Amino acid sequence: MNDGDGDGEWEVLDSVVEYETGWYTGGYDLVEQPNGTTKRYYWAELEPAVVIVASTGEELVFVEQYRPAIRQTHLELPAGIVEDGESFTEAGARELREETGFEPDGVSLLQRMWVATGAMRHERAIVFAEGLTPVDQELDDNEFLSVRPVSIEEALAAAREEPTNEATVEGVLLAHEEGLI
């Protein structure tokens, strides 16, 4: 057991999967806390994902889509799941091509992060894509979205207008902080 200073791992006494949806797995870990008590910490585990900040130089490529989980339509950055064997940059290029119909000349990793660490096991990366060439869009059968190029000035405002999501806010503000937009 650690001394409670937050520097060590807590012992996991049991790990239980309570459900699997095909989209995510949910369960809990029974852990021994630093004071010797035990507690269940619930989690949802999702596949790694990538968010793409795609720039034409003058505009960012956004998509507009309805999000059934929160019953709202969002103007947001393209994003998707990282497939087995892909890097975040490879997944970003593929998702951008499939969702928006733009093939990037270059994709670079801006940031890897864990999302909602109090309840989720979900790693996400933000990538920057440039040198966009139009190609055929290849939407999945559950993707219903519209591609919306937005000026960089408008994108900075749109990222912070409600409704928005954390991935869009993080991606746009990080690319701006890095001097990419």
Image: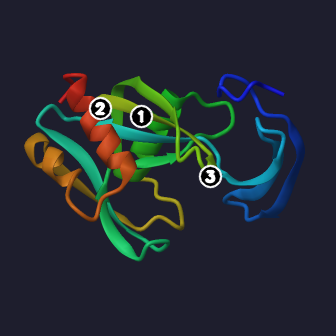
For this rendering, which residue is in front, 88 or 133? 88
User: Are discs 2 and 1 less than 8 Å apart at CB?
Assistant: yes
Where residue 128 appears, as percent x and y from the top left, is: 34, 30
Q: Dot 1: within a 10 Å radius of its alpha carbon, few (fewer than 14), some, or many (20 or more) residues? A: many
Q: Is residue 34 above or below residue 108?
A: below
Residue type for callout 3? Ala
The earlier-in-sequence mark between 2 and 1 is: 1
Q: Which residue is mark 3?
A: 119
Asked if residue 35 lies left or right of residue 86, the reply is: right
Q: From mark 2 to mark 3, how far is it between C-alphas? A: 24 Å
Q: From mark 1 to mark 3, how far is it between C-alphas? A: 21 Å
Q: From mark 2 to mark 1, how far is it between C-alphas? A: 9 Å
Q: Which residue is mark 2?
A: 174
Instruction: Tell me the residue at 66%/22% (across/down).
Output: 7
The earlier-in-sequence mark between 1 and 3 is: 3
Badge number at residue 77: none
For the N terminus, the image quarter is top right
Most distant residue in the right direction: 13
Q: Is residue 111 above or below residue 15?
A: above
Where residue 180 appears, as percent x and y from the top left, is: 21, 25
Most distant residue in the bottom direction: 71
Where residue 123 appears, as percent x and y from the top left, is: 58, 38
Q: Which residue is mark 1?
A: 126
Quadrant position of residue 56: top left
Where residue 90 appears, as percent x and y from the top left, is: 51, 30
Q: Is residue 157 above or below residue 179?
A: below
Asked if residue 127 lies left or right of residue 34, the reply is: left
Instruction: Tell me the residue at 23%/50% (across/down).
Output: 159
